[in-house]
Image (tube, coloured by chain):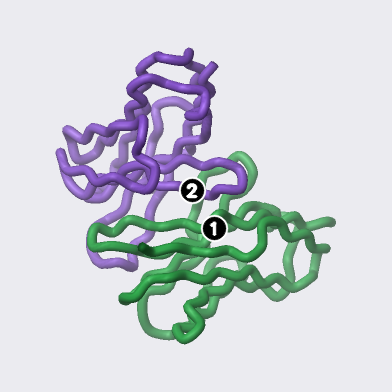
Amino acid sequence: AQSVSQHNHHVILSEAASLELGCNYSYGGTVNLFWYVQYPGQHLQLLLKYFSGDPLVKGIKGFEAEFIKSKFSFNLRKPSVQWSDTAEYFCAVNGGSQGNLIFGKGTKLSVKP
Amino acid sequence: DVKVTQSSRYLVKRTGEKVFLECVQDMDHENMFWYRQDPGLGLRLIYFSYDVKMKEKGDIPEGYSVSREKKERFSLILESASTNQTSMYLCASRALTGGGTEAFFGQGTRLTVV
């Protein structure tokens, strides 16, 4: 069965610090990978996605992620975080023939002003 | 603008009640999903549907059922609500055109069972 593992439950950073959130997946076939963000009180929205091509993908708000197939990883990065990045971040993988998404447990990011 | 609409933001129900959570999408998507979100557990898939009247169990289907009579509407039913079903419920939809399409989420329904 497919699974997604996010390494950090809660990350606390100061503004301007660099961010890297880990995500590893287990799935034997071709994967499609996603990062979603949930700002306080808001619905989940897509940050970025990978399904083919350049393994370094850029998303909204300065986020990027790198797909490393040999490591089954899809880590999220941002060079300089802002207070407004405070949110919960979820990694997801496309699994199965019917297109369901499997989510990790999420990483809560708190950015101190 | 794409839209997934859940009928209620907040619900309070009594133990043993039958509860209906409704979700409507306006994007003509084939796939629809119900997840529950709990702190520290992320999003766990309850059921999904890939076509009208078609459904598949997710990871935690016990105590739930679903109905999809029309393409745009996907209902989650709690047959007999229990306190351990107190949670945030998220509906999502997604096109079936390949694996790289994103899922769109509703605002969520926070259900409290007392």
Tell me whether marks 2 and 1 sit on the same chain. no
Looking at numbered disc 2 in the image, what kind of residue is underneath it?
A: Leu
- Chain ID at mark 1: A
Q: Which residue is mark 2?
A: B43
Pick whichever, A14 or B80, lies toward us: B80
> Residue at point 51% right, 17% down?
B12
Secondary element under disc 1, as helix, strand or loop, is: strand
Is A56 situated left or right of A77 in this image?
A: left
Pick whichever, A92 or B72, lies toward us: A92
Is A69 situated left or right of A90 in this image?
A: left
Pick whichever, B5 or B35, lies toward us: B35
- Colour assigned to chain A in the rendering is green
Q: Where residue A38 appears, x then y in whole percent?
A: 57, 50
Is A96 situated left or right of A76 in this image?
A: left
For residue B38, above or below residue B95: above
Q: Quadrant of residue A22?
A: bottom right
- The purple one among the chains is B
Secondary element under disc 2, as helix, strand or loop, is: strand
> Residue at point 57% right, 42% down?
A42
> Residue at point 48% right, 29% down?
B85
Q: Where residue B82 appears, x then y in whole percent?
A: 46, 22
Can residue B91 be seen?
yes
Pick whichever, A64 or B77, lies toward us: B77
Q: Which residue is mark 1?
A: A90
Q: Quadrant of the C terminus of chain B?
A: top right
- Chain ID at mark 2: B
Asked whether the residues under the numbered discs 2 and 1 touch, taking CB atoms below 8 Å apart as contact, a structural biologist would say yes
Looking at numbered disc 1 in the image, what kind of residue is underneath it?
A: Phe
Q: Where residue A91 appears, x then y in whole percent?
A: 51, 62
For residue A61, above or below residue B37: below
Can residue B106 be seen?
no
